[in-house]
Image (spheres, coloured by chain):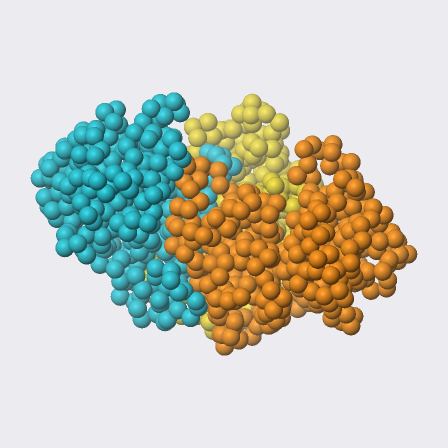
Chain colours: A yellow, B orange, C cyan
Amino acid sequence: MQFAGSHILSVTQFERADVERIFTVADRMEPYAHRRRVTKVLDGAILGSMFFEPSTRTRVSFGSAFNLLGGEVRETTGFENSAIAKGESLYDTARVLSGYSDVIAMRHPAAGSVAEFAAASRVPVINGGDGANEHPSQALLDLYTIKKELAGRGRAIDGLRIAMVGDLRYGRTVHSLCKLLCLFDKVQVVLVSPQELKMPGEIVEELRQAGHEVIESDALEASIAHVDIVYSTRIQEERFSSQQEADLYRGRFRLNQSIYTEHCEPNTVIMHPLPRDSRDTARELDDDLNDNPNLAIFRQTDNGVLVRMALFALVLDVVDQVDRHARDVNWYTAGRF
Amino acid sequence: MQFAGSHILSVTQFERADVERIFTVADRMEPYAHRRRVTKVLDGAILGSMFFEPSTRTRVSFGSAFNLLGGEVRETTGFENSAIAKGESLYDTARVLSGYSDVIAMRHPAAGSVAEFAAASRVPVINGGDGANEHPSQALLDLYTIKKELAGRGRAIDGLRIAMVGDLRYGRTVHSLCKLLCLFDKVQVVLVSPQELKMPGEIVEELRQAGHEVIESDALEASIAHVDIVYSTRIQEERFSSQQEADLYRGRFRLNQSIYTEHCEPNTVIMHPLPRDSRDTARELDDDLNDNPNLAIFRQTDNGVLVRMALFALVLDVVDQVDRHARDVNWYTAGRF
Amino acid sequence: MQFAGSHILSVTQFERADVERIFTVADRMEPYAHRRRVTKVLDGAILGSMFFEPSTRTRVSFGSAFNLLGGEVRETTGFENSAIAKGESLYDTARVLSGYSDVIAMRHPAAGSVAEFAAASRVPVINGGDGANEHPSQALLDLYTIKKELAGRGRAIDGLRIAMVGDLRYGRTVHSLCKLLCLFDKVQVVLVSPQELKMPGEIVEELRQAGHEVIESDALEASIAHVDIVYSTRIQEERFSSQQEADLYRGRFRLNQSIYTEHCEPNTVIMHPLPRDSRDTARELDDDLNDNPNLAIFRQTDNGVLVRMALFALVLDVVDQVDRHARDVNWYTAGRF
């Protein structure tokens, strides 16, 4: 695809070459995100951060990514009392707000709303999550993390063996990740969930159409024995009709250090889209894994900054200018990354 | 007036020469707002954006305007749990907050509160709306839009023929616009509203004192036949005592493409302070006007950025330095304006 | 202490030399805070401002201080709907958010939470208030104000005579200020409060252990006759079990101009941590003191910016670079400080 001026709305818009291009650019962002260098390539540019649904992590990650490229951020959160409540259409909102910034990152609770907004926007829009529908930057940072974690182990995305564990029915991130994996070759996907929270059939079908092997299971320990990655997820309790119903599944699949030691291969990578639920009733990834060097969950969120920087640099077409506007960091940063 | 260091609180503080000065400066902001050039003239300056009442559009417009001049924005929205709730006076709030920024843009639900705040502030304060009272930057951007739209039609503000339609009783923007029009010559104002939502008598009187012709009507179609501008407004339902009362008036005056074609002169400009109410029960400006090149409603909000940049440049006295701190935009902006 | 890379969590972490170092650096920030000079020493750095409990004053003060050093601010306020509500531990929150910024300023309602967060953070954390526990930057700005106010009167912190008045039981700021005073010599502290709102015994004990003279009283007028500073506080009504209980104490000790004239020494300095309660039922510092040049309450908040700039410059280790990245202010600033 042509990135300059494009919207980033869905993982389905990418070919394999596009994903690889994003990852190559993300690699080049590392000196800036890891605070060895400062770039001002987007000095004077404005990000409109429109989070019509709250999200500290994703919102701050987008904002920091834009700041790291030298740009400014104008932020809106929530939408009670807003113009939308007074009957304004998304078309009008988009026409107006796109006059205030150079690029927009947007989250909205309604599926399809970000695409509708983008159609009327005069500047590129990056989907930061539209309800149960899409969250493409999360899927990209997950896959980018897989690639980086496996690079040191002599393995690649082609030939990957991954177990996805937990709420595979409502977990938006695993859906999008599966779609991205369809762009690659010979992946083995082990899907571990309660019967009622299985991966939707159409996604399983897509994986198989792509030539991948799919195994479905409701037993954790056997399923994680021969994989490169265990991708654990939280029960999306806000999607259930009652707290009691969510409680039925919470805590069903728990990975801790002793299970890891007993069942996993030595360097199996542990991932999670976060937040992980650390309450006693859940603990899908136990705190006793925190010192396990294969726990990649915080490298994932760090990688999110790299991927979002890459998306901004691509849609604003400044990739080749980044290093030209750079200098060394001049403040204390010891021991950070 | 002397702009440097002044507060911008009310349209009544301006002479005609002041308004023209603001518009001249706004014109000079266009290369920056339209993303052909970047200026850093206010690099290091801080805008205190104090929106004690929510407003996405106005808040972001002020913030982006300040960013476009190179400055930073520190924002506060809402005021539950704030010091004011603990019994702090506006005097104290102003003394404190004006120590944190170089200029303040403020919205507050109580009429007169922004002026009270400004009296204690140590930095210039721009009124971003104080309840039903004043919203001077909106009136300025409306008049600036009228001037620009008419320029290409060989017409000017002097001699203007304008129809104001809808809720003229509670619509703050039409009140302020009328006051500004009193600074100009030979304006014809057609006021179209339900009997119960007529323009307040004292404003009609002011227009007549200024030598303008005022026609009041409750019939839309005849009223828009011979005007340069149709300025439509939303029913301000939040000002009515009940939803049912607002429902009596909503949808009373609807302009759509077929009415426009049948009744208006060929190039009649359509304006609206936004948000327009696009629900079926309202539709004061129908969506089928969206492709009409005379629909100026989004150029209005774009012009708001120019006018707010001009106000900041004037009160901080940097107008003549803007171009000196400038360079070309280096990112992708195709097709934006 | 070694400031570079350190957290600022509690006044108890400082030796006298540390406090004096902070004040020396704060003095050097004055040209920047008072808008004569602009520095860009932290150009490219990001402050994560995490206010899990609302606070306009402290939040904006930290943000502006960081902007005044040339850095950017990414802000989060409130924490309903956040990851914490989904069961995320403070450890996880800290690991994630510290990947998005170079330094964090944080407020949280739970005592000890900021220290817990800091333990997992990869960047320095400055405590902006953790419930009833600590608010070190407030204590520092109070003491810094005392030092500056007394300098012109030929007096110093050593030998200080100070009266603290009001709610000494729940007032977090007076507790922290007393702890800092323990680092100095020969201070006389007069504690004026209702019997039920006395200073906690352990703090009185600490003051005495430090060799200071402590006098407790419930009579205002006699207590303020021979002091350098009257430090008045608001009844912390949000800490009482009922509004009625708070009402018993509100308005008990009121200082106004006639009491000041009759009882205080000529140049006695009046301080208050703000907000002061200006409702008729409270008025611990009457508005008729506003023109008294010894009313230092707004100089206190201005000094807060200096102290917070100093803390940022110290923990990021850029003190000696500040002046090198500086230039004169180029916009209108007349009459501000």
Residue C132 against residue A295 in the figure, above or below: above
Viewer-nearest residue: A261 or B105: B105
- Whether residue A142 is visible to the viewer of this picture, yes or no, is no
> Relative to residue B4, is residue C138 drawn left or right?
left
- Quarter of the image with the C terminus of chain A in it: bottom left
Residue at 52 percent across and 37 percent down: it is: C81
Viewer-nearest residue: B196 or A283: B196
Q: Residue extending furthest bottom?
A: B324
Residue B68 against residue B109 in the figure, above or below: below
Residue at 14 percent across and 52 percent down: it is: C155
Residue B68: image quadrant is: bottom right
> Relative to residue B252, is residue B306 drawn left or right?
left
Viewer-nearest residue: A237 or A84: A84
- Quarter of the image with the N terminus of chain A in it: bottom right
Q: Residue extending furthest right?
A: B262
| Residue B111 image position (x, y, % from top left) | 56, 45
Please state the total of marks drawn on the protein image: 0
Residue A168 against residue A69 in the figure, above or below: above
Viewer-nearest residue: B274 or A124: B274
Residue at 61 percent across and 41 percent down: it is: A81
Residue at 57 percent across and 55 percent down: it is: B10
| Residue C145 image position (x, y, % from top left) | 25, 51
> Relative to residue A186, is residue A332 drawn left or right?
left
Residue B27: image quadrant is: bottom right
| Residue B208 image position (x, y, % from top left) | 73, 56
| Residue C69 image position (x, y, % from top left) | 36, 61
- Whether residue A164 is visible to the viewer of this picture, yes or no, is yes
